[in-house]
Image (cartoon, coloured by chain):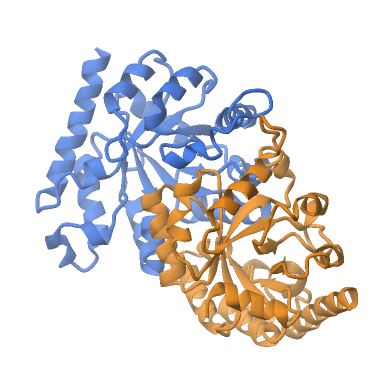
Chain colours: A blue, B orange
Amino acid sequence: MTAQTKLSNKNKEKKFVCVGLDTDIEILPKHILKLENPVLEFNKQIIENTAEYAAAYKLNFAFYEKDGDKGMQNLFQTVKLIPKDILIIADAKRGDIGNTAKMYAKEIFDFFNFDSVTLNPYMGKDSLDPFLSYHDKLNFILTLTSNQGALDFEKLKCEDGSFLFQKVIDKVSSWNLVKNCGLVFGATQLEDLKENLDRTDQMPLLIPGVGAQGGSFKDIVELLKTKPDKNYIVNVSRGIIYKSKEVDFAVAAKSEIIKYNKTFSEVLF
Amino acid sequence: MTAQTKLSNKNKEKKFVCVGLDTDIEILPKHILKLENPVLEFNKQIIENTAEYAAAYKLNFAFYEKDGDKGMQNLFQTVKLIPKDILIIADAKRGDIGNTAKMYAKEIFDFFNFDSVTLNPYMGKDSLDPFLSYHDKLNFILTLTSNQGALDFEKLKCEDGSFLFQKVIDKVSSWNLVKNCGLVFGATQLEDLKENLDRTDQMPLLIPGVGAQGGSFKDIVELLKTKPDKNYIVNVSRGIIYKSKEVDFAVAAKSEIIKYNKTFSEVLF
């Protein structure tokens, strides 16, 4: 099944929550730390308890790479634990020259078997081409991110009066020939998202920044309700996986994602 | 020894070549492939034959990550093989929100023990802060890269008439409070480097793109000669490590780096 189909199927089933598996061994529940591989066991229980309700899973590479080869094994094993009809996103924010980008694309799509990736546009089209050559995958390109630093460059005004992030949206739109591009748009930037929603054309959105970073799930759903054909996912990491840091963490994660889905239903119907 | 000291020491010894260990198992000499760990053995022989002449080594993460946990082990072991007085750069081009950037910084500086890293500025200052908090390390931030795609965003004109990459130089300069910032400037962009050399202030330069990518080592040395106090390194990857793809690869690499150093001496004296 293509990445595009996985996403649109889940959206049709009214599922919009992407669970961010930002699993950090330093803040896992104590009872889990006693097990042989705490990170993998934690992920396994989270997945088992949330898969029925999730639209996607996102694994931020930083949390796994920091543990070296052990972390890479956990990344690999976690991807295998996720049901095949759910979109799996490598939150890697890569971007490098063609030669090297090709290696990253092979790593993420062929070795680890991800459906989707996040990419950094700074170095331009040829740095993303090796990813774009995978037609059945989804490439989410950073546009306007949820952090304060977005003001430094992303919101710089260009010569023609538009912002850099708007230039990124327009360029990516022109590269989206086989519908394998999406955009990352921070949940804390909803005013900008509202103003630029038409500009994002048919491209699906990955919206991080809800919860710990301050974005509101309800506001996003209200806004996207105006575009019923738009595919999108809202990422929640800490708000779901660390809802409880006790023995009941997985059940708490389940209740939380159900709560998000309920918020969605209330706004939509 | 701090990263800054390592670099300036080598520059004082008239060493300016950074050897790029872009080791790709698919194009290694045949006799090496028969060994138990071809990538590590290849790196070992290259390092043994070039360390006397090199100013730095740069490991592009893409070439190692694509081999999963085995690749991460090779990255780790390769760093250990490099003499401690030589700057070791993690060419990772990272950039992520603070929380996550912190993990990447820990991975690169604490776990792998690199002296230096390449970073992507798109997400702004707070995405780089966790790296900048390491005062004894060197953070090379992408400005104008050597690829064609540099035209897409890096050379976009801003409202005040300057290019985006010039905005990056100015911002990074303002973040360089403890002299732990450097800039990546592609060797194919020498006209721009010339025009912006004063703008780069005291920041050291990492200049990739020589050889396979078309930049000329001699032209760079001619240009930088005008700034005798500037610390810089010119990266050569394929041009050195794959100079020969036969049994004599390591000796060929040695001859080649000596040739680069000779070019340097000829221009400079």
The quadrant in which the C terminus of chain A is found is top left
Left or right? Give the position of A246 relative to A269: left
Q: Nearer the viewer, residue B203 or B265?
A: B203
Q: Position of residue A133 (x, y in %)?
A: 62, 41
Question: In the image, what residue occupies the spot 82% across and 75% down?
Answer: B260
Residue at position x 16%, y 47% from top? A250
Image height of B40 relative to B187, above or below: below
Considering the image in quadrants, where does the N terminus of chain A appear? top left
**Above/below status of B65 relative to B78:** above
Single out the residue that lies furthest toward the left.
Answer: A247
Q: Percent x, y for residue B84? A: 55, 84
Residue A60 visible within the image = no
Q: Quadrant of residue A210?
A: top left
Foreground of the two, B158 or B244: B158
Quick check: can you spot residue A26? yes
- B170 versus B177 height, above or below: above
Foreground residue among A214 and A226: A214
- The image quadrant of residue A191 is top left
Residue at 45% of width from left, 69% of height from top? B109
The picture places residue B171, in percent across and down from the top left corner, at 58, 47
Instruction: Give percent across and percent down for residue B23.
Output: 63, 70
- For the image, the number of numbered tags is 0
